[in-house]
Amino acid sequence: MTTITQTNTSPPANTAASPLLELRNVTQVFSSGPIWKREHNYAVNDVSFSLTEKPALITAVAGESGSGKTTLGRIMLGFQRPTSGQVLFSGKDVTGMRGGERRQYRRQVQAIFQDPFSVYNPFYKIDHIFTVAIARFKLASSSDEARHLIEEAISGVGLRPSETLGRYPHQLSGGQRQRVMVARSLLLKPQVIIADEPVSMVDASLRATILETLRALNHELGIAILYITHDLTTAYQVADNIMIMYRGHVVEAGDVEHVINDPKHPYTRLLVQSIPMPDPSRRWADMRGVNDPPFSDVEVTQGMCPFVNRCPDALAECAQDVPDTYGLDEHRISKCFLYQNAGTVPNADIAAYFNIRDASPSNVDAADNM
Ligand SMILES: Nc1ncnc2c1ncn2[C@@H]1O[C@H](COP(=O)(O)OP(=O)(O)OP(=O)(O)O)[C@@H](O)[C@H]1O
Ligand code: SF4
Ligand SMILES: [Mg+2]
């Protein structure tokens, strides 16, 4: 295996973009087991990046099950306080927010979940999720105004208010329920949407509609979107940039076209090939000592590359140290020793390497679906 050598790193393209929701060195450890045999699961491991307001982009987070995607999203939503590191919204640490400030953060950063049914109370009509949001955030001063806002939001996601309001959750299809959740976000006009596997439980025909709606929310209203998925195809369709996670680490990130069409990190390559297995012709003995004990998950996250026990390209040093984050070009970083000559990215601020799309209205091609 040849180590790719690049002597210099291009400067990041978007250091001037203003961070809106920012993670700084965020780590989330879940501990389990008895005290004398405690196991520490690094669900999110020293992740730093930000979603920007101008431009507002769609950033996908992809990786296999258990890679830390949902935990990352929950931390950004403020549902989970990280073990260490900071979450900043408009420059303010969200852990210190109280009262109106906290309410504002809650309004501005909205969630769309994988299973919309679990979000609904089956005893309340669909109207309830809208009226509660309107009351909580004081969005209307009369019931007529509230009704108008609700109907506008429902129409905005391609549903008919007359066929949606007045019904119970079980009277809508899964796709309709998911679109109602998108409509709720639309009503609140947030600055950020964290969408965690929003289309994995709807059928293919509705998948495109929901994804187009998300794109329109981003392009038309300037809402920054974190699109969490295990599906690289939809990530490619909808996102501007992508972060690939493996065991809590962001192992590759950057412009979605570059990452999917020309993956650099060995894990991304495996994901893109849809073969989540190392090269079977390559034996353990080729990569490390035959008598070495097998790695446990915990050991792997400490002191070595988290992917070393599955990597077809592993070098000797991969089991001795954790790779830094290297800047391969102005729109790509990778956390892999193969690129160690490319130059370390300071503070692992990977969002500075994201590609900035021209967000002018002429680029809007999803408006028809609004
Ligand atoms: N509340 C919790 N307590 C303990 N461990 C947790 C908790 N939440 C998540 N984990 C663990 O953290 C790791 C990351 O989980 P997470 O749900 O973030 O992964 P994911 O990438 O969203 O997976 P999936 O694609 O299956 O949704 C997993 O090993 C999981 O078991
Ligand atoms: S750093 Fe990790 S991913 Fe890169 S070659 Fe080594 S084991 Fe493979
Ligand atoms: Mg998840």
Image (tube, grey):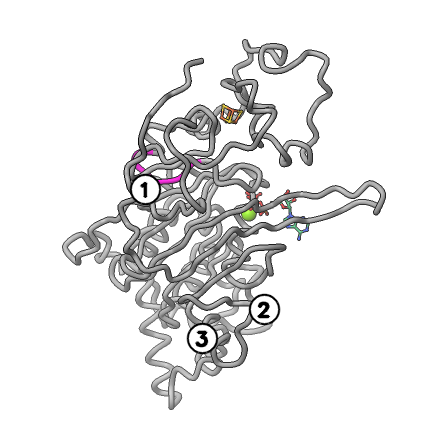
Q: Secondary structure at mark 3?
A: helix
Indicate which disc, 2 or 1, sits on the residue closer to the N terminus: 2
Q: Identity of the amino acid at label 1?
A: Gln
Disc nearer the start of the sequence (3/2): 3
In primary-sequence order, the first of circles 3 and 1 is: 3
Q: Furthest residue to the bottom?
A: 142
Which dot, 3 or 1, sits closer to the camera?
A: 3
Find out if the beta carbon at label 2 lies less than 8 Å from the nearest ligand 3 atom: no
Q: Which residue is mark 2?
A: 121
The residue pinned by badge 3 equals 104
Question: The N terminus appears in which quarter of the rendering?
Answer: top left
Q: Is mark 3 within 8 Å of ligand 1?
A: no
- Residue 269, located in which quarter of the rendered image? top left
Disc 3 versus disc 1: distance between alpha carbons? 31 Å
Q: Residue at x 55, y 66 (%)?
A: 120
Along the line of sight, which residue is nearer the eye, 113 or 38? 38
Image position, residue 88 (x, y; %) = 46, 63
Can residue 255 be found in the magenta stretch? Answer: yes
Which amino acid type is marked by label 3? Gln
Q: Position of residue 364 (x, y in %)?
A: 20, 54
Q: Nearer the viewer, mark 2 or mark 1?
A: 1
At label 2, which amino acid type do we have? Asn
Give the residues drawn in magenta, as a range. 252-258
Relative to 277, 241 lies left or right: left
Whether residue 216 is situated above or below residue 183 in the rendered picture: above
Crowd tier of the residue under label 2, counting other residues whose Cα lies within 10 Å: few below 14, some 14–19, many 20 or above: few
* Disc 3 to disc 2, C-alpha distance: 24 Å
The residue closer to the viewer here, 369 or 139, is 139
**Which numbered mark, 3 or 2, is in the foreground of this view?**
3
Q: Quadrant of residue 308?
A: top right
Q: Nearer the viewer, residue 18 or 309?
A: 18
Residue 237, label in figure = 1
